[in-house]
Amino acid sequence: MPGSTPGFLVAMPHLKDPNFADTVVLMLEHNAEGAVGLVVNRPFPGDPGTIATGLGIDWPRRTLGQVRYGGPVRTQNGCLLHPPSNLFPDSQIVGSGIAVSTSRDALTGVLESPSCPFRLMLGYAGWGPGQLERELREGSWLFVPVSSALLFDTPADKIYDMALASIGAQRFTLGSGGSNIH
């Protein structure tokens, strides 16, 4: 998988780490030094309004649901996912229809543009050298091609199943209450 980013990693049912169970991760970087990604299907567990207050930004109430838990690393830091049609000086395109930015100006810009979809991701997922490769060999993750529609147009609680459906797979429940993919 190194060099094949961007894409989504879908956690397989046997991955029980509470940070990643039932998650979809947008991969941002994967090389010999490790990997970095953003969990895209978990709402931020706190009050997003406190983020805006702390930054001194007027946060429209309509956008509170756009804040997501990006992963367990550095949850006090955030990055902004947005379409490349709204590029900011620090924006980097990470996939078809997806750009990332870490500047306050970019956040202010998307908040002032009611038609610009975005996701503010707090925290990120990180893997050390060889760790993600090992997890892939163990079958803990399924690779799914990146989709801006999945990221910007799909409710957080539907992203997991829609990511699977994009490759013709689905989750099913086992008799013992567990689940599997087929």
Image (spheres, grey):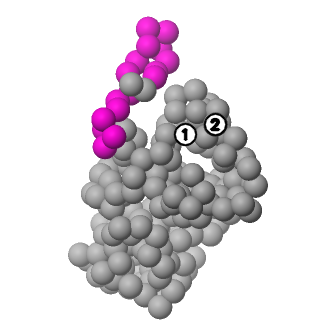
Q: Is residue 171 above or below residue 104?
A: above
Magenta stretch: includes residue 27: no
* Residue placed most toward the observer, 83 or 115: 83
State whether the magenta stretch is mostly helix, strand or loop.
loop
Q: Residue at x 33, y 69 (%)?
A: 97
* Residue placed most toward the observer, 47 or 146: 146
Is residue 43 shown to the viewer in this render?
A: no
Residue 137 is labelled as 2
- Of badges 1 and 2, the one in the foreground is 2
Q: Position of residue 173 (x, y in %)?
A: 40, 18
Q: Residue at x 46, y 70 (%)?
A: 94
Q: Provide the secondary structure element on which disc 2 rests.
A: helix
Q: Amino acid at mark 1?
A: Trp
Say which residue label 1 marks: 141
* Residue placed most toward the observer, 102 or 65: 102
- What's the magenta region? 165-180
Q: Residues within 10 Å of mark 2 (few under 14, many from 20)?
A: few
The Cα atoms of the two marked residues, 1 and 2, are separated by: 9 Å
Q: Residues within 10 Å of mark 1 (few under 14, many from 20)?
A: many
Marks 1 and 2 close (CB-CB < 8 Å): no
Q: Position of residue 74 (x, y in %)?
A: 68, 63
Q: Residue furthest left?
A: 115
Q: Amino acid at mark 2?
A: Arg
Q: Provide the secondary structure element on which disc 1 rests.
A: strand
Q: Is residue 96 above or below residue 21?
A: below
Q: Quarter holding the C terminus?
A: top left
Q: Residue at x 44, y 8 (%)?
A: 175
Q: Quadrant of residue 70?
A: bottom right
